[in-house]
Image (tube, rainbow, N blue to C red):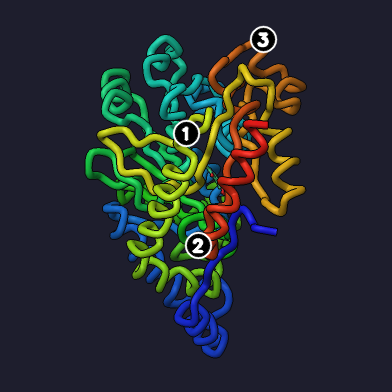
Amino acid sequence: MIPVCEPLLTEEDIALAIDCLRSGWISSAGKYIEQFETLWAKYCGMPYGIAVSNGTVALQLAVKTLELKEGDEVIMPTFTIISCAQALIYNGIKPVLIDMDPINWQMDRSQIEAKITDKTKAIMVVHIYGHPADMDPILDIAKRYNLYIIEDAAEAHGAEYKGKKCGSLGDISVFSFYANKIITTGEGGMVLVKDLDLAERARSLRNLCFQKRQRFLHDELGFNFRLTNLQASLAIKQIERINEIIGRKIEIAKTYNSLLQDLPLQLPMQETWAKSVYWVYGIVLNDKRGLTSQDLIERLFEKGIETRPFFLGMHEQPVFKKMGLFHSERYPVAERLARYGLYLPNGLTLQDHDMEYIAQTIKREILQ
Ligand SMILES: *Cc1c(COP(=O)(O)O)cnc(C)c1O
């Protein structure tokens, strides 16, 4: 079976993990946590990094840090992981959805302004599948309406918008370091912020709001969202070789582009203002031909190829229907992407001959 993604840890990553184990600093204090926060914030061009246990809680922490209030609204794309919507809902905030751009699969910025009300406090931008969202118009709207920008860059390590790194474009940004992300600590996440007060607030909330001077005195309820030093140790060398990692992702995408170019498929594109890191390599089947992504996923699986379907929009989630959210809302682009989109194996352990086999198999299955 060719896996959709397999993490690649090298001997230098393992050496630091062993060093961490030998040092005894296996909990959430220790030098690797600080190094990880400093190195990652610096790489992204943000002043402060707060490492947390995963990307989902990074979103929850980011929203909590901004002190949005019960009943506030935040605009976000429907086509994303559920972590984005639940970070708002757990904070009592109403998610307000936007459909996607059919060409680059990012949030359709032209739909944002119509959704702004006097309760809107922020826009949560998600860079989908390694390609940046079109930020300038979104930043312009945020400025005119005095809204925060929360940037979910969990799929966009090293991706750039007009030469600036994803994760440095908003007020607060989050990353995930789950095993299939571009840099991984197994499980892990980070919140990046521009403002020192917000950084201190996020740090305090991450660690149960223990006070510095009197530890067991609490002014506010926080969380235990700490990352371990052992997990952080895995990231240090990956950050040093990130250009190599991203280079391989781009090379895989280019190879697939040329192998699949003549088929009736929509392939990932790169806008002129974007540097995509092709976190996943997505393809969208032609909706007029009858074959859905679920059909193709099953057929490829029988041929030893593991793939994954695209996101199912938030407005189509049973859990939110039960909560009375997004009632009868329709987002046709997201609905089509969910039914006809899938992504192919593109992990760092993938071999070139695997890609040829995958492309040939897809060709046979969709043209038959
Ligand atoms: C992976 C991902 C997350 C969640 O990260 P976890 O570490 O898996 O909790 C959040 N947002 C996006 C866009 C993601 O792709």
Q: Give me the C-alpha separation between circle 2 and circle 1.
A: 25 Å
Q: Is residue 322 visible?
A: yes
Location of the C terminus (image quadrant): top right
Mark 3 or mark 2, earlier in chain: 3
Q: Residue at x 49, y 65 (%)?
A: 214
Q: Residue at x 63, y 31 (%)?
A: 367
The amino acid pointed to by label 3 is: Ser
- Which element is circle 3 on? loop
Labels in figure, total: 3
Q: Which residue is mark 1?
A: 262
Q: Give me the C-alpha separation between circle 3 and circle 2.
A: 41 Å
Q: Which residue is mark 3?
A: 328
Task: Determine whether the beta carbon of the residue marked 1 sits less than 8 angstroms from the nearest atom of ligand 1.
Answer: no
Cβ–Cβ under 8 Å for marks 2 and 1: no
Q: Is residue 309 left or right of residue 254?
A: right
The amino acid pointed to by label 1 is: Asp
Q: Residue at x 44, y 53 (%)?
A: 252
| Camera-nearest label, 2 or 1 | 1
Q: Give me the C-alpha separation between circle 3 and circle 1.
A: 38 Å
Q: Position of residue 358 (x, y in %)?
A: 59, 49
Q: Which residue is mark 2?
A: 348
